[in-house]
Image (cartoon, helix red, strand yellow):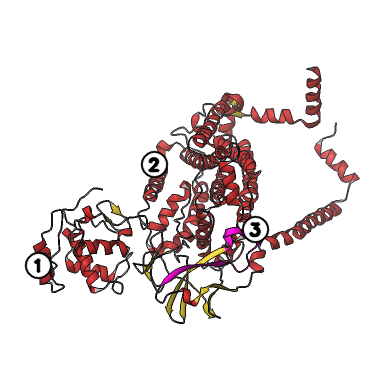
Amino acid sequence: MNLLRRVVDAFEERTGLLKLMGDLARHPVPPDTGWWYVFGSATAVAFIVQIVTGIALSTAYISSSGDAYQALQFITTRALMGNVLRGMHFFGASAMVLLVGIHAIQVFLMGCYKYPREFNWITGVVLLFLTLAMGFTGQLLRWDQTAVWSIVVGAEQAARMPVIGGMLAHFMLAGKTLGAATLSRFFAFHVFFIPALIFAVLGIHLYLVLHDGISEPPVAGKPVDPATYHASYDKLIKERGVPFWPDAAWRDVVFAVAVIAAIVILAVVFGPPKLSKPPNPSLLARDPSPDWYLLWYYALLALIPHKMTTPTILLAPLVAIIVLILVPIVSNKGERHPRNRPWAVGAVIVILMMIGTLWAEAIHEPWSPAFEAKPLPAVLVGASQGPVADGARLFYDKGCEFCHRISGHGGRRGPDLTYVGDRLTKDDLTIRIMNGGYNMPAYSGNLSPGDLEDLVIFLRSRRRAPASVAAVNSELTNGGQAAVRKDFRVAPVRASR
Amino acid sequence: MATDSEQSEQVTEHGFSPERRNFVARVSIGLMGLGALIVAVPVIGFIIGPLIRRAPDVWRPVGKVDDFKIGTTVKVAFLDPSPLAWAGVTAQTAAWLRRKSADEFVAFAINCTHLGCPVRWLAKANLFMCPCHGGVYYANGEVAGGPPPLPLFRYPVRISQGQVEIRTSAVPLG
């Protein structure tokens, strides 16, 4: 024991590290910081989990375009605890994104970004976007069919940038096409470049936390005044300050361990995201979409007016970064408590509602054609032969069903046509089918007159009440369109699956 | 015990003159910059190398002329311009090849001009559809509906010694 003590003392005498660490850990912080202050440290802990699990995964992962898929299969199915480790890395990334978001909201709502902590807010904004960059590049290292198409989508978005767009896209791909060099490039970004930046900016972030001190909990009616803030803060620390370790840090430890436990439990229970097909760019049956934290942005690109796509791709991230950086520059003093900052609270609610709504839409992807749709069953069509049955077959063959829904079958891209016969006449339907619309192709050169007639008959038969044969036949005859079909039979439409 | 200013003066007396100290500091900073520069040049050059040293495009055979029926559109797969040994299946790419007449072919890029997703050919519908955001194209590649801003891009295609050949190109980007 004496020997150990002497070794420690000798080490301390020559380095002073223990005193330094102790002083840092026990630096005084404001009292009553509470549980709202745990999200920053929890984000850092999630980052550490990512480093540890990432290093472990890198011992088996091969950053070669030709071998990574097999390496991932090996890690997932054969390596001891590889499945759990991949799961931890995925849920750790999710935790990091979620926590950095909550941390940003907490800092914003509590006005912690105000004087003298403006620059630390800016470093936090940089860390937020670096975290998202880690998430995107990490998803691509899951080197399957989704990954390669996600890279192409990412390159396409980069290419929208004026002047340098094409070069930027080919820089991402590491060439003119996706290939051998692409994965190595993203691996280097994910494992070296971006983490190095995170370490550097996180270092500044933590230094500034120590330099400026942890912000005291906001008090309603006590605004920040740069002229008096330091004196007020120093007085608070001197009179009521408590050592960070362990008086305040115990909550950070409890929450961080809970986060780690949640990551492990989720990894064990749900495992990592499944690998899709091999990363062969000539396999086309894939609908690439990002992981959940960028899914809302993907939905945004689907729902905005088409002409707004390029401006949105170019300006939305830029505007977001500029607005976030401007926050402490525009408002670095005054009230901190959310009770007296209704606009701040309102802005957060609106942003969360917008992202939440886009997320909810993204889960169903109503804008995507339902290629998995099957032909409508005869019982739903109401006929097994004749024009209605033929029309139903055309409804599927011509791709209508991929975008239109009938009685719970088909896509959601276009209007639901379950009862279209109640609201559109024969002429309405004919015009729409022939001319197309905003999202719909014109079928004028794509349907024979007979096919068009059958399709219209089928759609006219989609009604709440059973359509009478005589009525529809009469409608057709009066319109001078087609001969009366003797075999026309229409059954009531079934509204459910 | 000497004060800070006294110590500073002592150092000044025993060290460089202010002018020389200024000169040495500037030279040191310049040398550090030079050191960084001579490391940075090959590093940056290597990283942006793919933009400068590009593989030349080549013609790739995708099948015999008689393998394709007139009026049909089929997917053809072929290799990148310069596949490396460790590219594996990522060296593959594809195009939608349409035979318009006995001696006329059109090769459409598989990438939607909206965001680059892989479009599918629906033979019975005579349409290309994109799974991502519902872009639709006619058989001739023109936009039929949805968000794509441009028609499908086309690869150069030719017939050589009874073979249909497609000229490799960069990933088409809108």
Which three-letter amino acid code belongs to the residue tagged 2?
Pro
**Residue A343 vertical placement versus A152 (above, below):** above
Q: Confirm whether circles 1 and 2 share one chain.
A: yes
Horizontal side of B11 relative to A283 (left or right) equals right
Q: Which residue is mark 3?
A: B86
Q: Is residue A364 above or below residue A23?
A: below
Residue A458 at x, y = what percent?
A: 20, 62
Query: The disc numbered 1 marks a residue on which chain?
Result: A
Q: Is residue A20 left or right of residue A277?
A: right
Kindly identify which residue carries mark 2: A342
Of badges 3 and 2, the one in the foreground is: 3
Q: Which residue is mark 1?
A: A474
Q: Is residue A378 left or right of residue A98?
A: left
Q: Position of residue A460 (x, y in %)?
A: 18, 62
Spatial separation of the CA atoms under disc 1 and disc 2: 63 Å
Q: Is residue B173 visible?
A: no
Q: Residue at x 40, y 57 (%)?
A: A302
Residue A310 seen in the current view: yes
Amino acid type of the residue that numbered disc 1 sits on in the rendered structure: Ser
Q: Nearer the viewer, residue B54 or A231?
A: B54
Q: Secondary structure at mark 1?
A: helix
- The chain letter for the residue carrying disc 2 is A
Who is closer to the viewer here, A70 or A444? A70
Q: Is A80 contained in the magenta span?
A: no
Q: Residue at x 55, y 46 (%)?
A: A131
Check the image and name the residue furthest to the right: B14
To which chain does the residue with label 3 belong?
Answer: B
Image quadrant occupied by the N terminus of chain A: top right
